[in-house]
Image (cartoon, helix red, strand yellow):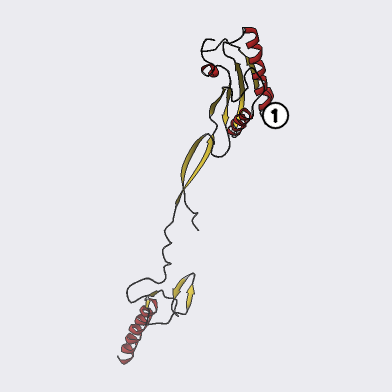
Amino acid sequence: MALKKIALISASALVALLMASSASAHDGDNVATGHKDGKLVDQWGNCIISKSGNDLCSPPPPPPVKCKIVKSCHTVPTKVTVSKNLAGDTNFKFDKSNLTAAGRAELEGFVNSLRGINISNVNVAGHTDAVGSASYNLKLSKKRAATVANFLVGHGVPGSKITAAGYGESQATLPASASNAARMVDRRVDITVKGTTTGAGKGRQVCTSRKVCPAAK
C-alpha cells in the first residue's frame, strides 16, 4: 500500500510540474531571458503576460498610414488674339511713313506683351484719312504698314508670319471736311496677332489631385 501511495503522489506531482511549465508566465513572476522569434519569453520559453493582461509576445500594432493629397497642374495652350491700334499723329508725323519716338515706344511695349505667345500669324493694316487723292493715300498706307512690319521683324517677330497691307482711305470713318484732330482716328495702323499661349503663368491651367499613401513596410 505504501508503495502504491508513493507512486500516486509522484504522478500528481509530475502533472503539476508539467502544467506549471506549460503555463504562461507573468511579469514579476519570472525574469525574461530574451526574444524568441521576435517574442518576449521567459527562461522556459513561455510567453510573458503582464499583470494587466497584456500579451507581451505580440508585436505592437503598426502606426496608422498617413496619406496626403498631391495636386499637379499643367498648362493647356489657349488660342489668343492680341490687337494694337497705332492711331494719331503721335505715331506717324502728318503725311509721313516713318515712326516717331512715341510710335517706336508704343510698338516696343506691344512686342513685349507678345512674350509667352506662340505666334501663328500677324496682320498689319495701314489706313489714312479722306484728305488727298485715293491713290496717294493708298500708297502712304502701304508704306506705314511696311514700316510697322519691319519694326516687328527687327524685334524678333518672324517675318514669315507677317502680312502687311495698305487700304488707303477706303475704311476712313470721317469725311475730309472733318477737323484734323478728329480725322486722326483714321490715320492709323491696326495690328492683329493670333497664336496660342505658352510658358509659365500663361494659358489655361488644368489641375488634378490624387491620394498618395506610403508603401507598407
Instruction: Name the residue tied to disc 1.
Output: 154
Across the whole image, how many numbered discs are drawn on residues? 1
Q: Residue at x 57, y 29 (%)?
A: 196
- Kindly identify the residue that appears in the image at 63 percent across and 11 percent down: 137
Give the class, few, some or many, for how many residues have Cα within 10 Å of label 1's Cα (few <14, many ≥20).
Answer: few
Q: Residue at x 61, y 17 (%)?
A: 126
Q: Is residue 66 left or right of residue 9?
A: right
* Residue 122 vs residue 20, the one in the foreground: 122
Residue placed most toward the observer, 114 or 131: 131
Q: Is residue 13 left or right of residue 147?
A: left
Q: Is residue 83 above or below residue 183?
A: below
Query: To which quarter of the image does residue 57 belong?
Result: bottom left
Quadrant, the N terminus: bottom left
Q: Is residue 213 left or right of residue 200?
A: left
Closest to the observer: 35 or 94? Answer: 94
Task: Give the side of residue 175 with respect to residue 52, left or right.
Answer: right
Question: Viewer-proximal residue, 129 or 214?
Answer: 129
- Estimate the x, y position of residue 98 in percent, counting from the top left: 67, 23
